[in-house]
């Protein structure tokens, strides 16, 4: 018999007893990317971020797992060489690894006047490991939505904001002169999938409230998340990891528990969608509604708090 939310809910005695260990999906990626971002006081320093990315994916602790795509492509980085922070275009680089580590970029470059920098840093951070538009545009989406969250932009407007920024991102990639033809050939997938999603929720205008099916429980959500995916695993790609997190946030309202049910507990790449959605919740609401048992004994909490304070000081 499957566990019910009552048995293993967000405030259960079982959860209160846990010493929570963080996977690569939060600590390793976000901590190191944040460290790189914290050193970017005035301009984008790609070599510094390359050093951080290389360190994190090649010198990881044994207890932290990593995706093959991230590690394989990080090994191609060479921060000691000119343009050593760039890797070739990858037809297989459309995964979600870039999307679920870029939220700290939105925290650092949150001001409207810094939008061009946010676009550039999120794209280049993304394509250090995921040099494919589906992958690195997911990095842009997660970073951009984080900046919207910090600035109090209503969530129904975020999707339209992303669509308005995509031409700027496309121009940057084209002007960079690096595997331009390959990137432009694959650009359409991310854009079309997001256009379709926003139309389905009725929020293409950035003003309307989202519409959900009358019945939208666990099974219905899993079916919908699968329909968004590239290959049947919802949330595993750069386009649908932030999309599912966004869908969960839109439907959760002011309920942390509802956010968890929608973003954390599904049959796809749920740890990635959970990481993204929880970051946006924190940017908007802090720890409101979150049981202290989920973070009191968090592994590496001291380090995470230190880098968060450093990030706050320079943002």
Image: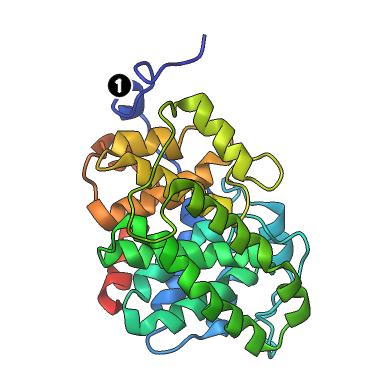
Please say whether residue 182 is visible from this viewpoint: yes
**How many marks overall?**
1
Q: Which residue is drawn at 48% across and 85% down?
A: 44
Q: Nearer the viewer, residue 254 or 42?
A: 254
Q: In this view, does 262 lie above or below 300?
A: above
Q: Nearer the viewer, residue 112 or 139?
A: 112
Please say whether residue 130 is visible from this viewpoint: no
Colour scheme of the picture: rainbow
Q: Which residue, as the protein is rendered here, is positioned at the far top?
A: 1
Horizontal side of 35 relative to 64 (left or right) equals left
Quadrant in the picture for residue 58: bottom right
Horizontal side of 50 relative to 252 (left or right) equals right
The percent position of residue 84, horizontal first and vertical second, equals 69, 83
Q: Is residue 234 above or below residue 305?
A: above
Q: Which residue, as the protein is rendered here, is positioned at the far left?
A: 288
Q: Which of 285 and 204 is in front in this view?
A: 204
Secondary structure state at the residue bearing disc 1: helix
Q: Which residue does the numbered mark 1 point to in the structure image?
A: 13
Q: Residue at x 56, y 83 (%)?
A: 46
The percent position of residue 47, horizontal first and vertical second, equals 58, 84
Quadrant in the picture for residue 252: top left
Horizontal side of 314 relative to 127 (left or right) equals left
């Amino acid at each position: 018999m499957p566990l019910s939310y009552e048995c293993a809910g967000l405030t259960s005695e079982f959860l209160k007893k846990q010493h929570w260990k963080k996977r690569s999906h939060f600590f390793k990626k976000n901590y190191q990317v944040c460290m790189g971002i914290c050193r970017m006081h005035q301009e984008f320093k790609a070599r510094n971020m390359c050093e951080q990315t290389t360190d994190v994916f090649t010198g990881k602790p044994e207890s932290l797992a990593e995706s093959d795509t991230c590690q394989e492509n990080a090994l191609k980085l060479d921060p000691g060489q000119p343009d050593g922070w760039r890797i070739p275009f990858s037809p297989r680089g459309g995964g979600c690894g870039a999307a679920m580590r870029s939220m700290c970029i939105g925290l650092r470059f949150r001001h409207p006047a810094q939008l061009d920098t946010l676009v550039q840093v999120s794209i280049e951070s993304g394509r250090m490991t995921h040099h494919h538009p589906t992958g690195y545009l997911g990095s842009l989406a997660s970073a951009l939505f984080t900046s919207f969250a910090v600035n109090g932009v209503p969530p129904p407007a975020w999707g339209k904001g992303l669509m308005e920024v995509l031409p700027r991102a496309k121009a940057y990639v084209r002007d960079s002169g690096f595997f331009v033809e390959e990137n432009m050939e694959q650009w359409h997938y991310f854009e079309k999938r997001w256009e379709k999603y926003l139309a389905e929720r009725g929020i293409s205008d950035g003003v309307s409230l989202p519409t959900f099916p009358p019945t939208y429980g666990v099974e219905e959500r899993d079916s919908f998340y699968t329909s968004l995916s590239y290959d049947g695993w919802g949330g595993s790609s750069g386009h649908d990891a932030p999309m599912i997190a966004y869908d969960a946030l839109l439907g959760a309202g002011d309920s942390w528990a509802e956010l968890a049910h929608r973003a954390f507990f599904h049959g796809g790449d749920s740890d990635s969608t959970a990481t993204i959605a929880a970051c946006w919740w924190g940017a908007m609401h802090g720890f409101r509604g979150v049981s202290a048992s989920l973070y009191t004994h968090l592994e590496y909490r001291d380090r995470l708090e230190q880098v968060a304070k450093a990030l706050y000081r320079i943002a």
